[in-house]
Image (cartoon, rainbow, N blue to C red):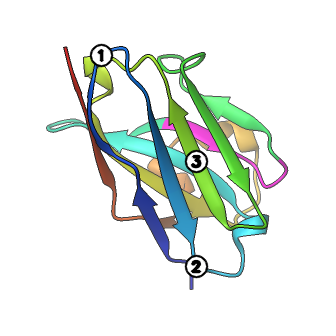
Amino acid sequence: QVQLVESGGGLVQAGGSLRLSCADSGRTFGSAAMGWFRQAPGKEREFVAAISWSGTTNYVDSVRGRFAISRDNAKNTLWLQMNNLKPEDTAVYYCAATLRSGAFYSRTHAYDYDDWGQGTQVTVTS
């Protein structure tokens, strides 16, 4: 069974940086497509970034060039490096995993993923 645990959230001023981590205790991390989503109060869960098992990446336009998703399959760990943070980046950030086959670049919806972490809060002040 996959268990995802996020860490690294916090309070940061606009323009600052944070690095989120997601540790996977399961055995299938190296085969899974992984994603980061976020959810702000009163809003739907939003796709942020995804990475295939082989390292192909995809980003929502609002974070492209500021955020970087990466993974280490040997350490069963996923990261999201967030630079030049903006107040509108404030949200609970979730990591997600799926072993389902399919077109990688279409996996931008919550229903494309099967396993989720508990979330970590990111707050960006102006």
Locate residue 82 relative to residue 45 in the image: left or right.
right
Q: Position of residue 106 (x, y in %)?
A: 66, 38
Crowd class of label 1 (few under 14; some 14 to 19; many from 20; radius 10 Å): some
Image-quadrant location for residue 43: top left
In three-dimensional space, the C-alpha distance between marks 2 and 1, rounded to whole angstroms, equals 33 Å
For the residue labelled by badge 3, is the local secondary structure a helix, a strand or a loop? strand
Q: Specify few, some or many for label 3: CA neighbours under 10 Å numbering under 14, 14-19, or 20 or more.
A: many
| Amino acid type assigned to the residue bearing label 3 in the image | Trp
Type of residue at label 2? Ser
Type of amino acid under label 1 = Ala
Residue 14 numbered mark, or none: 1
- Which mark is first along the chain, 2 or 3? 2
Asked whether residue 29 appears in the rendered view, the answer is yes
* Tag shown at residue 79: 3
Residue span colored magenta:
48-54
34 sits to left or right of 82: right
At x 70% / y 64%, what residue is drawn?
100
The quarter of the rendered structure image containing the N terminus is bottom right
Circle 2 or circle 1, nearest the eye: 1
Figure check: 119 above or below 30: above
> Relative to 46, is 69 on the left or the right?
right
SS for dot 1: loop
On the rendered image, what quadrant is the C terminus found in? top left
Considering the numbered disc 2 on the image, is that residue within a helix, a strand or a loop? Answer: loop
State which tag comes first along the sequence, 2 or 1.
1
Of the numbered discs in the image, which one, if any, rests on residue 25?
A: 2
At 34% from the left edge and 46% from the top edge, which residue is drawn? 9
Report if the CB atoms under discs 2 and 1 are less than 8 Å apart. Answer: no
Magenta segment includes 50:
yes
Q: Is 109 placed left or right of 101 in the picture?
A: left
Give the total of numbered labels: 3
x, y percentage for residue 2? 56, 78
